[in-house]
Amino acid sequence: MAKIRVGVAGYGVIGQRLADGVALQEDMELVGVADVAPTLAVRALKEKGMPYDLYTALPEKRGELDALKIPVSGTLEDLVKKCDVMLDATSAGVGAKNKELYAKHGKKGIFQGGEKNAVADVFFHGYANYEKGIGAQFLKLTSCNTTGLIRAVDCIDRKAGVERVAITIIRRVADPGDYHRGLTNALQIDHAPSHQALDLMTIMPHVGATGILVHTPVTHGHIITVVMTTKKELSVENALEFFSEHPRIRPVSIDEGFLGNASLFRYARDLGNPRGDMYEIAVWRDSIVKSGKDLMFAINIPQEAVVIPENIDAVRACTGMQKDRIEGTDATNRYLGIGKWKA
């Protein structure tokens, strides 16, 4: 069976990780990546020996790449022509323009959470609504926070039914290495409800959700607290059992040394994970408590890598590689090495 040919547009924080993730899928072929200029990521690609072919998204700027002797294999359109699916990790708004190119050549496109919902036929999550993505031409992923949140809510919903959730997102202000948010020493609150709660209801319309978001002057991950009302009352032990069964949810505890987001980032580096990435969300065992009949817990969102598995799930769904959500997500997990900590 021929491998599905995948290209990545935008070789930034997410694009680099998408390229690495696709390259690990033994039933997919990474055709190449596209970017606009010799960014630090592109310069690093050259210094690593060009493991991926690079295409220029702005041919008029190719001279900048040539001047640095960075090999260029063609234009973005050349890349699109060679692919079955394009994973678009460009800046918000650029993906919508790129969609015209994908449509022109009859290719499938998968967009990130920063694009408007109208860019896609399906608002997609690998576990919550995999079946809706089967055969679709254009899919859009949820944001990092929403992706991890839906994993946790869907996990419990399939076991006990979830009626509503109330969330508080303690959000990192920027990715490591970013300067556009400035140097801050303050917390900033957004208007409620947060878009993550609204997006969750778009994917899971049977769940009532609301939420508050607080920006914090840190870079290594978000933390979300969740208060959940379930149809079937659960014990703390039930919830921990269900979370432990999920391949992309990792239970941790304070006693083990996982004091917060930075502990998880450091642990990922100690594991030797590239860039300190972790695909799984973590749920603190110590945080799972009951408030009356409601369940409360806290999860960590590794924002730079958490959406990568769901992007690959989207490739599987839209191309029909696997038509069952467990078969599709299991294949993604296997090639990415997700859940190996359980062994």
Image (cartoon, rainbow, N blue to C red):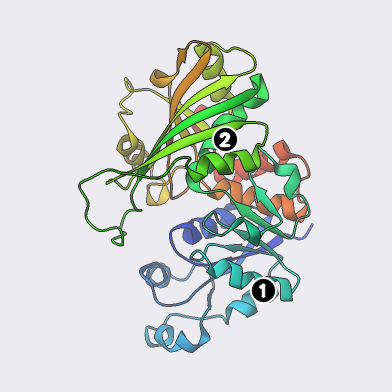
Residue farthest to the front, as pictured: 191
Q: Position of residue 205 (x, y in %)?
A: 67, 36
Q: Residue at x 57, y 67 (%)?
A: 95
- Quarter of the picture containing the N terminus is bottom right
Residue 288: quadrant of the picture: top left
Residue 172 shows which numbered tag?
none
- Mark 2 residue type: Arg
Query: Is there a contact, CB below 8 Å, between mark 2 and mark 1?
Result: no
The total number of labels drawn is: 2
Can residue 248 be seen here? The reply is no
Q: Position of residue 77 (x, y in %)?
A: 63, 79
Q: Position of residue 11 (x, y in %)?
A: 48, 66
What residue is pinned by disc 2? 151
Tell me the CA gap for discs 2 and 1: 31 Å
Relative to residue 289, is residue 114 depicted above or below? below
Relative to residue 278, is residue 41 depicted above or below? below
Viewer-nearest residue: 13 or 71: 13
Label 1's element? helix
Relative to residue 301, is residue 152 depicted above or below? above
State left or right for residue 2 relative to residue 114.
right
Viewer-nearest residue: 60 or 201: 201
State left or right for residue 310 relative to residue 64.
right
Mark 1: few/some/many CA within 10 Å (<14, 14-19, 20+): few
Q: Position of residue 59 (x, y in %)?
A: 52, 86
Q: Residue at x 40, y 76 (%)?
A: 38
State left or right for residue 126 relative to residue 238.
right
The numbered mark, 2 or 1, whose residue comes first in the sequence reads 1
What residue is pinned by disc 1? 100
Label 2's element? helix
- Mark 1 residue type: Glu
Mark 2: few/some/many CA within 10 Å (<14, 14-19, 20+): many
Residue 163: quadrant of the picture: top right
